[in-house]
Image (tube, grey):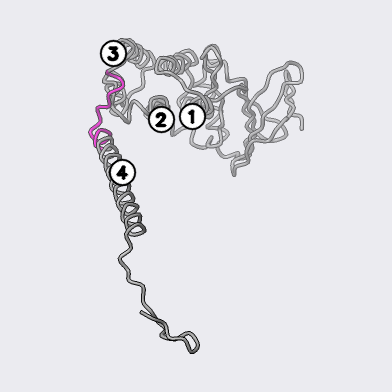
């Protein structure tokens, strides 16, 4: 399948998703080695409002992942840059990432948000662990999956903050569970109560948090502060102690039983009973 405009020809190389609103493809520009996410929108009712949203809210000089939108064969198309590579989800699940590396990843994500300065819908859409692409240098790229394009007008700053909070929870799941790093806990608390999104201020606060976290003593980071986590650690130690005690009791019982059976074998106390008085016609003497 080939989708054409005046300047480009997009060749469909894979079909990603079909929804009641339309279809999503991965395409390649036949004139250059670049790939794109292409939304084919068949729901014509939302097209006028979407065109106005794209025209008034997108700054092409900053949001360079946005390529174009157009009408082809009576369907509306939206084209966004597509990046191949390791997703944030794959990296965190398959590799051990140090705290310092994960702090840097968070900073890179926020830095990219600032640089692209995209509308809230696209920002919320790309802030998922499977759509964030991580390069070996830890630089970040965003992919997009506009399957919920009907909700473009409903996305706001709070939705973006919630999406970023989800990424933050994924990056620092262990530290948040243990509550072992106060600067990180404080920043997380501020994310949950914030209502207005200011990219620059959020990036500034995060950078400050990173400086404080990196200067925190390593031995203190290893000590969990959550009372539930500490309670569970005590329960695990208690269970381990009970397990050792049970093993010791079983060993003592086994040794005792072994001694008892050996003594029985050496000093039998059972009298042999005579059950027959005659063998044939011969009387058995006592």
- Residue shown at 59%/41% (left/top)? 21
Which of the 4 quarters of the picture holds residue 193? top left
Q: How far separated are the C-alphas under marks 1 and 4?
A: 43 Å
What secondary structure is marked by label 3?
Answer: loop
What secondary structure is marked by label 4?
Answer: helix
Q: Position of residue 199 (x, y in %)?
A: 39, 16
Q: Residue at label 2? A: 166
Discs 2, 1 touching: Cβ within 8 Å? yes
Bounds of the magenta span?
220-231
Residue 128, numbered circle: 1
Which of the 4 quarters of the picture holds residue 180? top left
Q: How far separated are the C-alphas under marks 3 and 4?
A: 35 Å
Q: Position of residue 12 (x, y in %)?
A: 73, 30
Q: Name the N-terminal-most of marks 3 and 2.
A: 2
Residue in the foreground of this view, choosing between 81 and 167? 167
Discs 3, 4 touching: Cβ within 8 Å? no
Q: Residue at label 3? A: 217
Q: Is residue 227 magenta?
A: yes
Q: Is residue 245 magenta?
A: no
Residue 243, numbered circle: 4
What secondary structure is marked by label 1?
Answer: loop
Q: How far separated are the C-alphas under marks 2 and 4?
A: 39 Å
Query: Closer to us: mark 1 or mark 4?
Result: 4
Which image quadrant: the C terminus? Answer: bottom left
Query: Closer to us: mark 1 or mark 3?
Result: 3
Q: Name the N-terminal-most of marks 3 and 4.
A: 3
């Amino acid at each position: 399948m080939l989708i054409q405009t005046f300047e480009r020809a997009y060749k469909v190389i894979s079909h990603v998703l079909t929804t009641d609103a339309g279809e999503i493809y991965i395409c390649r520009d036949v004139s250059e080695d670049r790939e794109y996410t292409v939304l084919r929108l068949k729901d014509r009712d939302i097209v006028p409002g979407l065109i106005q949203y794209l025209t008034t809210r997108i700054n092409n000089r900053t949001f360079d992942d946005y390529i174009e939108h157009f009408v082809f064969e009576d369907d509306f198309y939206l084209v966004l840059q597509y990046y191949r590579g390791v997703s944030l989800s794959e990296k965190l699940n398959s590799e051990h990432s140090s705290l310092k590396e994960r702090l840097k990843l968070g900073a890179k994500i926020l830095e990219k948000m600032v640089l692209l300065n995209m509308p809230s819908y696209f920002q919320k859409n790309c802030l998922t662990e499977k759509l964030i692409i991580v390069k070996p240098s830890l630089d970040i790229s965003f992919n997009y999956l506009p399957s919920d394009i009907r909700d473009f007008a409903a996305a706001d700053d709070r939705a973006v903050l919630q999406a970023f909070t989800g990424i933050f929870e994924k990056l620092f799941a262990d530290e948040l569970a243990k509550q072992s790093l106060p600067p990180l806990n404080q920043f997380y608390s501020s994310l949950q109560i914030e209502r207005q999104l200011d990219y620059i201020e959020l990036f500034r606060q995060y950078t400050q948090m990173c400086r404080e976290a990196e200067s925190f003593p390593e031995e203190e980071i290893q000590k969990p502060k959550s009372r539930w986590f500490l309670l569970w650690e005590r329960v695990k130690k208690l269970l381990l102690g009970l397990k050792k005690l049970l093993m010791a009791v079983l060993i003592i019982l086994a040794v005792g039983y072994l001694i008892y059976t050996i003594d029985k074998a050496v000093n039998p106390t059972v009298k042999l009973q005579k059950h027959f008085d005659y063998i044939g016609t011969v009387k058995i003497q006592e």
